[in-house]
């Protein structure tokens, strides 16, 4: 191969421009192409038959539409098997079938891939005046939510032009997601895979206001954001904290209303029960550290020391300080609780429930 990467193109009901794109890739880049027919149907058989006639273009596929994620994983598996014995093979560059990724940009992503074998290469677009409003708005919202969830800053989370190093293809195949949410899951799993990320600025091209896109704004957006909220530690941590608050309140009401304890005394066992509940939920479901190297005793001790620290070093002192400055307790208490919430999240994620990599 002239360039030691393969261009993978998932295609669902493509136009004639796909044929021109593949021909140009073969002529100007000289690298192999893999086109995945994502169940386009008999109406598009002619296009795929023409692609099969192009030397160096491999057309694979299946009858029923599986979604972009399914098509990408099918292509990754094909590439991994085909080039398994080729030590010069550097990886796969994914491109869209609608002609919106230019040859020069595909080359730049491939070049960056060859120079950075431990990074996901992102061909990021600059969203100027000519970009459709729905694309610009959708991308900006997703960038913001993704950054909160992952702590990683990426300029364009929705780009389909990406470079995946060869040694990470197997992990890519095992990722969750069959439609457009798969590409977001790829970004959410970067840290777990030990994969860095690098950006290459590409030209922004929209043909007929992006009318050829098969992205369902409502359905696919719901899947993407649902995946972010489900996978991200911070959002699961918020739900866990709300659940612990409910448990705390229920125990408090039971003890106080039945006359077993006074209102002041009932808060202590209520807080103990809710803390045990919160610890168990955070360990197993929020931070997924149930298979970690640290014991329940070590993590439990760390967690309850954090609870004591927050109560006596953060919440009460901060609350007293704000009140002394003339701020109402109705305002000072929520502020102190927010500070406690942030400190607790950071300490639990980075220290208490941190899983050591082997």
Image (tube, rainbow, N blue to C red):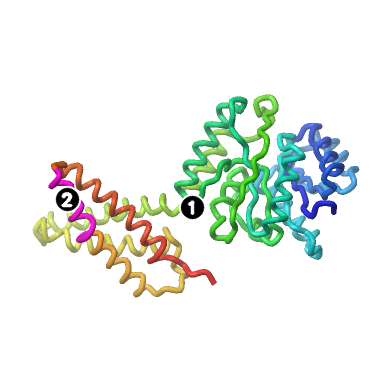
According to the picture, the residue beneath numbered tag 1 turns out to be 231
**Residue at the location (20% across, 42% down)?**
331
Do we see residue 307 in this rendering? Answer: yes
Q: What secondary structure is found at the residue carrying circle 1?
A: helix
Classify 190 as above or below 225. Answer: below
Q: Which residue is mark 2?
A: 321
What range of the chain is rendered magenta? Answer: 311-325
Crowd class of label 2 (few under 14; some 14 to 19; many from 20; radius 10 Å): some
Measured Cα–Cα span from mark 2 to mark 1:
37 Å
Q: Is residue 354 above or below residue 228?
A: below
The residue that appears at 56% across and 55% down in the rendered structure is: 190
Percent of width and height locating residue 187: 57, 50
> Is residue 319 rendered magenta in the image?
yes
Q: Is residue 297 above or below residue 173?
A: below
Answer left or right for 173 relative to 149.
Answer: right
Depicted 32 relative to depicted 14: above or below: below
Tell how many labels. Answer: 2
Residue at 20% in and 45% down:
332
Q: Which sits in the foreground, 237 or 102?
A: 102
Q: Which mark's residue is nearer the viewer, 2 or 1?
A: 2
Task: Compare marks 2 and 1 and give the one earlier in the sequence.
Answer: 1
In magenta segment, residue 316: yes
Q: Position of residue 76 (x, y in %)?
A: 72, 54
Q: Quadrant of the C terminus?
A: bottom right
2 sits left or right of 143 in the view: right
Whether residue 67 is visible, yes or no, is no
């Amino acid at each position: 191969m002239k360039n030691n990467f393969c261009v993978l193109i998932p295609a669902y009901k493509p136009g004639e421009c796909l044929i021109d794109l593949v021909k140009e890739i073969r002529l100007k880049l000289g690298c192999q192409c893999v086109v995945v027919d994502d169940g386009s149907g008999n109406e598009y058989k002619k296009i795929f038959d023409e692609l099969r006639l192009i030397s160096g273009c491999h057309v694979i596929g299946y009858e029923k539409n599986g979604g972009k994620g399914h098509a990408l994983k099918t292509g990754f598996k094909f590439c991994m098997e085909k080039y398994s014995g080729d030590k010069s093979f550097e990886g796969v560059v994914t491109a869209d079938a609608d002609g919106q990724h230019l040859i020069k940009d595909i080359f730049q992503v491939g070049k960056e891939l060859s120079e950075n074998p431990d990074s996901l290469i992102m061909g990021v677009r600059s969203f100027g005046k000519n970009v459709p409003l729905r694309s610009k708005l959708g991308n900006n919202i997703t960038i913001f939510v993704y950054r909160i969830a992952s702590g990683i800053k990426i300029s364009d989370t929705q780009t389909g032009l990406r470079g995946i190093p060869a040694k990470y293809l197997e992990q890519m195949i095992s990722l969750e997601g069959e439609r457009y949410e798969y590409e977001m899951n790829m970004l959410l799993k970067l840290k777990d895979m030990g994969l860095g990320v690098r950006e290459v600025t590409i030209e922004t091209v929209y043909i007929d206001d992006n009318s050829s896109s098969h992205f369902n704004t409502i359905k696919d957006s719901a899947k993407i954001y649902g995946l972010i909220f489900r996978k991200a530690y911070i959002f699961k941590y918020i739900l866990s904290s709300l659940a612990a608050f409910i448990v705390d309140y229920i125990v408090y009401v039971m003890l106080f209303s039945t006359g077993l304890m006074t209102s002041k005394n009932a808060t202590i066992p209520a807080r103990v029960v809710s803390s045990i509940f919160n610890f168990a939920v955070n360990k197993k479901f929020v931070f997924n550290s149930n298979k970690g190297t640290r014991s329940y005793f070590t993590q439990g001790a760390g967690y309850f020391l954090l609870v004591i620290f927050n109560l006596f070093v953060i919440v009460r002192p901060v609350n007293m300080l704000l009140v002394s400055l003339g701020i109402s307790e109705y305002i000072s208490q929520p502020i102190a609780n927010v500070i406690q919430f942030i400190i607790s999240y950071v300490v639990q994620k980075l220290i208490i429930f941190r899983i050591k990599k082997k």
